[in-house]
Amino acid sequence: RKEVEQDPGPFNVPEGATVAFNCTYSNSASQSFFWYRQDCRKEPKLLMSVYSSGNEDGRFTAQLNRASQYISLLIRDSKLSDSATYLCVVNMLRILTGGGNKLTFGTGTQLKVEL
Amino acid sequence: DTGVSQNPRHKITKRGQNVTFRCDPISEHNRLYWYRQTLGQGPEFLTYFQNEAQLEKSRLLSDRFSAERPKGSFSTLEIQRTEQGDSAMYLCASSSQPGQGNTIYFGEGSWLTVV
């Protein structure tokens, strides 16, 4: 079983639609959670961190359910510019090796927003 | 530009040749990471440095791969006797100490094609 699982999509949605992505992770010791955005042939960029209390950044809402080991991302009023791959990312803080961050990425969910 | 810098951005090499990629992290960041990403997959962790010390290596990092960060600043990733399966984007990332943001920032990646 993969450590982080996502539906690869693609999700094709009309402009203005609301779209939701889900992700599950297998390691209950995971400590922090993120959504990254990756445009075609570009590097991943941090979209937002994910907290158990839920957090919102403009049109984007992220939610974490630790009991179910489930992470979600909701995009409201989608724009053409939202077309990208959204990567679910889980962090294990490596206490034994100096406290660095070992990010584990899902395969990504591709979103295509159309006119 | 004060972001993570990688070069070369693109490299085409014949099977069996050696290649080296360089990464210059954000100047005040003491942690440096290498990831590899193949088409349709999320980035996979390869190795991690805190200053000049290489603290963790993935099983993905075979004997043909070696990474160094000799002075705790820039890093190099060398692949010896390249194989077609090494074709991927090699991503470098850096972060600062926890409590100083600790966000991981990625470079634009180095694309390797082995023919």
Image (spheres, coloured by chain):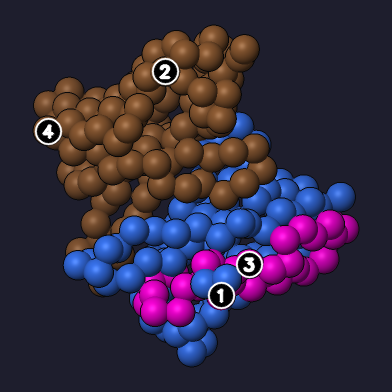
Chain colours: A brown, B blue
Q: Secondary structure at mark 4?
A: loop
Distance from Cα at disc 4 to Cα at disc 3 = 37 Å
Assess whether mark 1 and mark 3 are in contact (beta carbons under 8 angstroms).
Answer: yes
- Specify the subunit that label 1 lies on: B
Q: Chain of mark 2?
A: A
Mark 4 crowd level (few <14, some 14–19, many ≥20, 10 Å Cα): few
Magenta segment range? B3-32
Q: Earlier in the sequence, mark 3 or mark 1?
A: 3
Which residue lies under the disc numbered 3? B6
- Give the CA distance from mark 2 to mark 1: 38 Å
Q: Give me the C-alpha separation between circle 2 and circle 4.
A: 22 Å
Are tags 2 and 4 found on a single chain? yes
Residue matched to label 2 = A77
**What separation in Å lies between label 2 and label 3 (alpha carbons)?**
35 Å
Q: Is residue B19 magenta?
A: yes
Amino acid carrying label 1: it is: Asp
Q: Residue at x 23, y 46 (%)?
A: A32
Q: Is residue A35 at least partly visible in the picture?
A: yes
